[in-house]
Amino acid sequence: MDMTQFNSSTSNSLIDKIKENGLCTGCGLCAAVAPVGAITIQLNASGYLRPMVHQPLSGETEQQIKAACPALVIKHAPQVSGQHPLWGPLQSVRTAYSSDAEIRRQGSSGGVISALADYLISSGKVDFVAQVATSTHDPLANELQISRSREDVIRAAGSRYAPSAPLQSLRALLDSGQRFAFVGKPCDVAALRQYARINPQVDRQVPYMLSFMCAGVPSIKGTHEVIRKLSSSPEKVVSFRYRGDGWPGMTRAVQADGQVFEMDYNSSWGTILNKHLQFRCKICPDGTGEFADVVCADAWYGKDGYPDFTERDGRSLLLARTAAGEALVREVMQREVIVASDLAVEEIAKMQPYQVDRKRMVLGRVIATRLARGVAPHYSRLGLVKASLAAKPVVWLKSAWGTWRRAKGEAQ
């Protein structure tokens, strides 16, 4: 992206243009970088979390946002090595599950992220884990939770297929002076990693960044549609989970009168939620958490060349991306916190075929976005050219054309 296109005489134009062009991920970093109260994160009319600017931003603040905001840039540091063209930096590839039966069942797959979070707290490696959990005020909303116990970690277990902005509280987390692990979407972790390059305090206080593979962030309207398909209504629901309590687990809504409604994962995500993704997710180069120390995903078993969503005991795909991540994984294996087995890197594509297609198509989609809207994020050192060359040209062009049409017509 040519950053000059985001320069203007009005100091709030940077945020405005990011939003107007559908580039915002909703991570919340800008609110933490700006002076207190200058930016707040709110749901917009489309059901996505977006920054609202309440006072002019200084040139210094805008420069920090430009350096770290994933709407503008996703870039590996030059010293990052060992990159796989599809899967990014890799130290090791394994399948795994938590040895704690409750954590394994409550997690979205094998409960490995929750097991790691619990271990980091109990071992004293961190003072707390910053992670997204269900809001204590709204069963359909997300909030950042400070987890300091196993009970906290279990409360946050399971996927949350709705908008979250965990980095909006980053200033307060750093001001605590404590060491913490951060768990977030790939774009959240990329933003935090990039911000660490201009704020050394991040690396001093955040020794571990954990993530999970992501297929995109649905609007809260997607959740509302799921609930209505269950013959309930958002106003009546007092408890809601997207999955977990099994693998992949059922979408489950509970009303105040005690009625329970359930829908299988393939129906909730596959036919409803994935139709509500924000535009930025459709041009995302990193659905696999390339900037994290450790990444987990569903280690789906295959059936007829496609993932099989039959209910069974959970199993996580476990990727260590950094030396720190690999050391942590080896430590929890040795202490039998998780049960893990080595996996050939070629097997990842069988478990996560969507991410293969996404990485191969994204360069064309970004080019199409630039042609349609005049701006697009700047992606660097992500192996996108190599990934594109592995795609079928006709499919690649068709994907780019579809993105151009959406970019021309889709509201933000």
Image: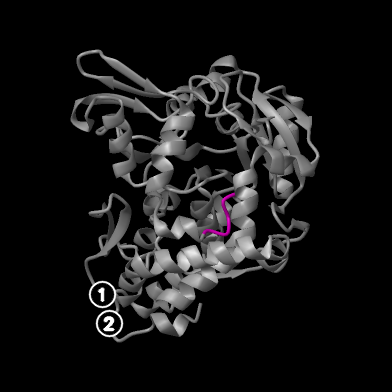
CB atoms at circles 1 and 2 under 8 Å apart?
yes
Task: Decide whether the magenta segment is chiefly helix, strand or loop.
Answer: loop
Q: Position of residue 351 (x, y in %)?
A: 67, 37
Check if residue 287 falls in the magenta segment: yes
Residue at 33%, 33% (x, y): give it.
Answer: 226
Disc 1 residue crowd, few under 14, some 14–19, many 20+, Cα 10 Å: some
| Quadrant hosting residue 339 | top right
User: In the figure, residue 251 lies in which quadrant?
Assistant: top left
Amino acid on which the number 2 mark rests in the picture: Thr
Query: Label 1 sits on what residue type?
Result: Pro
The residue identified by callout 2 is 10
User: Could you say whether the residue bearing mark 1 is in a helix, strand or loop?
Assistant: loop
Pick the front one: 119 or 307: 307
User: Disc 2 on helix, strand or loop?
Assistant: loop
Nearest the viewer among 308 and 376 is 308
Distance from Cα at disc 1 to Cα at disc 2 = 8 Å
Q: Position of residue 192 (x, y in %)?
A: 51, 56
Asked if one can make out residue 181 in the rendered structure from this viewpoint, the answer is: yes
Whether residue 408 is situated above or below residue 220 in the rendered picture: below
Residue 17: image location, x then y, percent: 34, 73
Residue placed under numbered mark 1 in the picture: 56
What residue span does the magenta drawing correspond to? 284-288
What residue lies at 32% left-to-right and 69% top-to-bottom? 20
